[in-house]
Image (cartoon, rainbow, N blue to C red):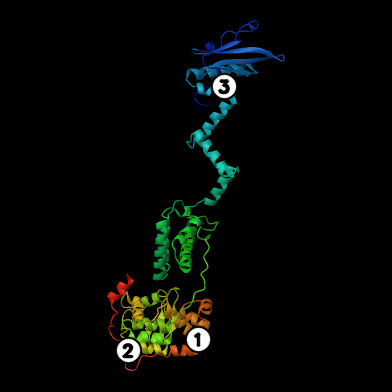
Amino acid sequence: MSDNFPTNSSLNSIQKPQNLVRRQSRKSARGPYQIIRFQSVKIPIYAFEHHGKTRYTIAFYLNGCRKKRQFTFLEDAKQEGLLIAQNIVRGMQSQNDLHPAERESFHAAQRILQDVEIPLVAAVEDYVQCRKILGGASLRSAVEEYCKRMGGLKQGVTVSEIAEELIIRKSQDGVSARYLEQLRSILGLFLEAFPGPIIDIQSEHIDSWLRKSKIGAVTRNNRLTILRVLFGFAKQRNYLPASEPTAADSVSKVKAGNTTTEIFEPEEIERLLLAAPAILVPYLAIAAFAGLRRAELCRLDWKAVKLERRIIELRADQAKTASRRIIPISDNLLAWLAPLERKGKVCKIQELPRMAPVLAETLGIRWPHNALRHSYISYRLALIQDVNKVALEAGNSSTMIFRHYRELVSEEAAEKWFSIYPPEGWEPPEKVGGLSLLTVRRKKD
């Protein structure tokens, strides 16, 4: 009970001689039956007959208005009169308009809220808003479900923190440098848009971000794949609920329409090889006759090109698929590589992959995207007629090989492709007119 209100046990001990004044005669029916006093305040109690029983009424003034309350028992009227008198003296008239049961509920609510230190009005407002949001459902049930879902989660972990942790883990797991670079690139773009806690990100946020990027379907799907890795890792680390799909899982990939696989004609690759400077020849020849990807070529060392064994050994950390790959060296590829100096990296300079399209432009030859690798796979499949073997050599799936490269060229064209040799006594030029690093860099800009 609050200090403002005495308990029932204390009522009889508070100025008892002064509080209970003379009992009036029942004959003076117009006057008070008793008067309760507390200091200068008097609260009269009136008695009256109702259906043969005596009832009691207390009367007092509150905010300029006269108030009455009726009681069946005299003791209840005396207790209420004393409380009202004390409150009036203490300047707490605002609580005198509450009935005893209402007052008890009020103070019980205040006692309940003491531990959480929330005002009663704020607690009631919060409760009403939650019930409205829940559509009248039980607030306690909703809270229990929330605790079940979020129990044990590490709250407030940001995208930046998780991305950094993921990259460290992947690096420790020995994934390829290219894959780490892809993680850093895509996750860097994502955390610029979403720097806050990962648990706040919803599927519609991810979908909107992917659409605003104005990228092709394949690139968009690749980005979504990386995001699913990030969100899956967050779930494993207990940053997201383990019992439900992540926001990235709920976003659908888009259908990448049928793409045309463009390749070079045998005459075109022969012109390119004969016109290329010595520094560019290994890049063109290995891509055209062994099918290595651009990034794989940039990581390739000449030690992996074993001419005596007629193989190129691509380590797991060099391959896109992070798995070791053995690619055969054909007779014509051996002929193009044998006269070259084979020390250090195959790609001596960073701009080398961009030299090839510039050279093609000077020769009036189209340079379709990834055309060297597409050409190798198409001609190799037409030559040996073995999808699985070509898939192993190319580091691709059999399904992709069958879907995109089957029957693109004839067997005769394939034989011609792998019969392209350098002329007798051929030595590649050190420089080519119109092809320089300055030219390549200007094309890039």
Q: Secondary structure at mark 3?
A: helix
The reply to whether residue 409 is in sight is yes
Q: Amino acid at mark 2?
A: Pro
CB-based contact (under 8 Å), mark 1 and mark 3: no
**Which circle, 1 or 3, is nearer the viewer?**
1
User: As drawn, is 81 to the left or to the right of 332?
Assistant: right
Disc 1 to disc 3, C-alpha distance: 102 Å
**In this view of the protein, which residue sits in the foreground, 87 or 434?**
434
Q: Amino acid at mark 1?
A: Ala
First in sequence: mark 2 vs mark 1: 2
User: As drawn, is 441 to the left or to the right of 82?
Assistant: left
Give the residue pinned by disc 3: 8
Q: At 61% across and 15% down in the image, what residue appears? A: 57
The reply to whether residue 308 is in sight is no
Kindly identify which numbered label has been placed on residue 421.
none
Residue furthest to the right: 52
